[in-house]
Image (cartoon, rainbow, N blue to C red):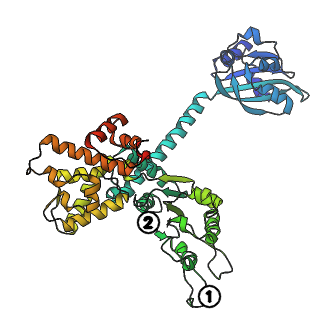
Amino acid sequence: MEKDAEILSLFKMSQVIDIFNVLADGIYISDAQGNTLWLNKASENLCGVPKAELIGRNVADLEEMGIFKPSVTRLVMEKGKPTTTIQLVNNKGKFLVTGHIIPDDLGKPELIVAHSRDITEAARASSQLEETVALLRRYSEEIQLMKREANQNLSTMLIGSSRAYLSLLELIKKVSVVDTTVLITGETGVGKSVIAEHIHQLSERASSPFVHVNCSAIPETLIESELFGYQKGAFTGASHTGKIGLVKMADKGTLFLDEISELPYHLQSKLLLLLQNKTFMPIGGTKTYTADVRIIAATNANLLDLVRIGKFRHDLYYRLNILPVNVPPLRERKEDIFPLLHHYLQKFNTKHNQQRRFSTEVLDVLHHYEWPGNVRELENLIERIVITAREDEIHVSDLPEELRTIGGLEESLFSLGGNLSLTERIEKIEAELIVQALKLHKTSRKTASALGITQALLMRRVKKYGIQLEGKESVI
């Protein structure tokens, strides 16, 4: 202290003030009661108020005016010790402020000196760093996703370019990078199992097992032992070594429960326990085991309807339905029919050593077909006609009878033989399309909507072609 006093004696007071004023940090000096005594230029600039208006004012009053919040001087007075806080000055910037007590000769507080340093830029830089880290993390996940997709050659698993299907693919990518339970819904044949395997292959569990369990294909008396296994001697006829269930076989990987609506009610509580705690108990067991599995479930049934009638547990439904993925039927993504047709044509041409190709008329029939069995029906149909077609070019006559009827396009209408004019051929096609559409949609309003014409125009065509309507309900 004596040495410090000796050094300070070499400076004039004006020089000390000049030194404080050249500092970029703020210096704010108050007495022990919080009355402002002096502040340097940096502090004056930060406060945005002339020094003359601050000197003599109490820091509590200035705090109420919003000059700075909170007042570190007030905090020091309340705590009786040096204090550091983040202070908002003049509603503009954030400052790291430390208040120090300067005692008198008796050791009692005489002055309080507040030293402030602007951390607004540092805070902004920190926020930018956090954003950059988050961005890099997202890019890293995308790169890993692309690598897994390339390694697994998954591009051929999912085919489609319609808006509905592209939205589905985007959702699948988002679902794949998390480890949460997924519920896939959709009609029979839309490709729910393909979607489930795609999610697994894009996930971090891709190198671990993907175990597919069809809940409707396993007898109710066996499904519990198949899923959870059993201990030796658990029941008559049980293996003397016991059995590891499919749940344990899927450890570290994905357990895909297809047709989850068919899971017996008494087993649903056991599945719920697995979902909640990652634990299960084999048949005949006395202790629980763990299985680190991700559950993906699929169904073509309305689980909420099953919940309402008491055939499906509501707590299990909500536990499964965390990430719902609905796969649209093929009739709602007509743009994808042509790519799928050509994909499977190429696939089965290669498989059966053929060189089949579609005629224009066949493509038109297949494009307008409703595909109640969706992609599975389409795939099976293409393999069938690749094998049975009479020539390399596939004609309407090569199609099953139900498609020729529903399509409403008789091959003879497209042949050059006969005495029908172009207008007559077009009218026959139009009449047949209207007949089939009426059979399918039942009412004239729905039929007109499906054909893309007004109801009035439809009724004029019905009258023109002498089409018989079945009952009054057909014209509603």
Q: Amino acid at mark 1?
A: Phe
Mark linked to residue 52: none
Q: Residues within 10 Å of mark 2 (few under 14, many from 20)?
A: few
Locate the N terminus by quadrant: top right
In the picture of the structure, the residue carrying the numbered disc 2 is 207
Residue in the foreground of this view, choosing between 241 and 386: 386
Q: Which residue is mark 1?
A: 235
Residue at horizontal 66 percent and vertical 75 percent from the top: 288
Q: Picture coordinates of residue 175 (x, y %)?
A: 49, 52
Residue at x 80%, y 25% (from the top left corner):
73
Q: Nearer the viewer, mark 2 or mark 1?
A: 1
Q: Is residue 258 left or right of residue 414?
A: right
**Residue closest to the eye, 242 or 151:** 242
Q: In this orientation, does residue 154 appear?
A: yes
Which residue corresponds to the image point at 29% horizontal and 60% vertical from the top-left? 402
Query: Would residue 425 appear left or right of 153 to someone viewing this image?
Result: left
